[in-house]
Image (cartoon, grey):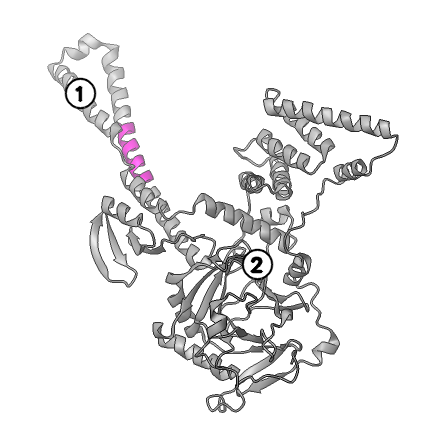
Amino acid sequence: MCLKLLWFTGIEVHTLNLSVVMVLIALEHLRFVFCALGNCYFFRSDKYSLLLFLGQMTDLIYAEKDLVQSLQEYIRAEEKKLSQIKSWAEKMDILTSKSASDPEGYLAHPVNAYKLVKRLNTDWLELENLVLQDTTNGFIANLTIQRQFFPTEEDETGAAKALMRLQDTYKLDPETLSRGNLPGTKYKSSLTVGDCFGMGKTAYNDGDYYHTVLWMEQALKQHDEGEDTTVSKVEILDYLSYAVFQFGDLHRAMELTRRLISLDSTHERAGSNLRYFEKLLEKEREEKEKENSINKTVTTTEAVVQSGAYERPLDYLPERDIYEALCRGEGVKMTPRRQKRLFCRYHDGNRNPHLLIAPFKEEDEWDSPHIVRYYDVMSDEEIEKIKQLAKPRLARATVRDPKTGVLTVASYRVSKSSWLEEDDDPVVAKVNQRMQHITGLTVKTAELLQVANYGMGGQYEPHFDFSRRPFDSTLKSEGNRLATFLNYMSDVEAGGATVFPDFGAAIWPKKGTAVFWYNLFRSGEGDYRTRHAACPVLVGCKWVSNKWFHERGNEFLRPCGRTEVD
């Protein structure tokens, strides 16, 4: 089997045999196009590659389609072989029925005697070769090659956690997710018992008993409803009973364990757990009798048993509830009084010559801090070009470790990003100049244009754009991040808002628009109100690009104010 290997520039290099390709694809950071059965797929090896970003996951759709075609070819070959064997068997059945009824009479004819010898010496050998013929080579070779680009165990875990993130942020119960009842979806999809069980196992392995209980209960519910599955109730109850026990719900843990034992009386761990639970319960009773009063903790546990509901544990983010509520469109502090202070206007960049004839439509999104949205900032053609340039370079977005200052990946920032220079394409320079004209700030000291793709559950939890770390090297040469210009390059069917938890604002993506705000006061002090977040994408794919303007070069374009907070 031969494959065509092409560099990402599109220049064909050589046709290589399979063994050579297998060596090459193992090389780290190799970018190439894989062609098979007339289809070409772009791939890039990346140590931070998590295949949860729709900008790249679309390649997997075509890869899977190619595998299905290969599988169908294998099935056709097997069916053809089986048809030949079946035809031979039917013919031989008729012949042997006749010959076995009168062997001597049959062999009295010399031609029959010759044909019997020939069949046993030659024809049956040919049949043996036909039966032993391996028709799997093409399919297995294709599968082996494409498996190099399949999602990993880490990717599957990441996908499961992304669903749980959506579940928590948008308050979706497992039933809603399992049935696929999501807003704005074009194609409906549902989770099987096995899928729900897999979600529960992922949570369990991560020590997340809250989601373990939710998803194991959903798996058990669908199993009880009669859904066909290879997962047994015993397996589900085994995980569920232990997870419930971790919440201190001893009564329900015993109830579930007894149900497990009724299905499999030989289950050793369940029997051991039940005896342990009974000892704990007996100990509780003795303590209650000894104290001659009802223990509050026990009362709480019994209340939990009745409801079967457990509270989501607190985590590291203090404004978690506010942030997630804003993502759902709840708690937005847009009062009628504030609304009266927001206006629409045409913006010419303080009579910038480039904008006098064609000013931009400007709309106030918030009054203080002032956040504005500009319309028709990027055309569809420019957006597609920017995405085209960014896709080959997309890598897992990083954050700077607050202790070491080293860039690293983090669970609170789940997206892929790339950086584009003006030399990459004229459209990049054109977009940069447009942002400069709109803001009145210089791009000479600004950062490169960053392009980000948020796929399944993609998010960036509350953060500041400006630096609060004195060891940042850019602070000395270019100053802090003065302002943020954020381009929305796609519409999002559900989720994906930009929210500001401090003052309760939520801004929703609109393709072709951009939002702008200052991160620093005129004094150079950080405006801590601008702490913001990119909400998880519930349905769809979110593309954005942004430009961070720095202080240096803008001293006279945005001069200091009279007070520290001007």
In the image, residue 11 sits, relative to residue 20, either above or below, namely below
Residue at image mark 2? 536
The answer to which image quadrant residue 6 occupies is bottom left
Viewed as shown, does residue 306 lie left or right of 394? right
Q: Judging from the image, what secondary structure is the residue with disc 2 in?
A: loop
Measuring from the top left, give residue 67's x and y in whole percent: 36, 46
Disc number for residue 350: none
> Which label lies toward us, 1 or 2?
2
Measuring from the top left, give residue 198's x and y in whole percent: 54, 40
Residue lying at the far right in this picture: please name it.
Answer: 292
Bounds of the magenta segment: 74-87
Q: Judging from the image, what secondary structure is the residue with disc 1 in?
A: helix
* Distance from Cα at disc 1 to Cα at disc 2: 70 Å
Return the residue nearer the eye: 516 or 497: 516
Task: Check if residue 85 falls in the magenta segment.
Answer: yes
Q: Residues within 10 Å of mark 1 (few under 14, many from 20)?
A: few
**Residue in the image at 81% along x and 25% along y:** 286
The answer to which image quadrant residue 29 occupies is bottom left
Q: Main secondary structure of the magenta part?
A: helix
Viewed as shown, does residue 127 lie left or right of 446? left
In the image, residue 175 sits, relative to residue 524, either above or below, namely above
Mark 1 belongs to which amino acid? Arg
Residue at image mark 1? 119
Task: Check if residue 56 falls in the magenta segment.
Answer: no
- Circles 1 and 2, Cβ within 8 Å, touching? The answer is no
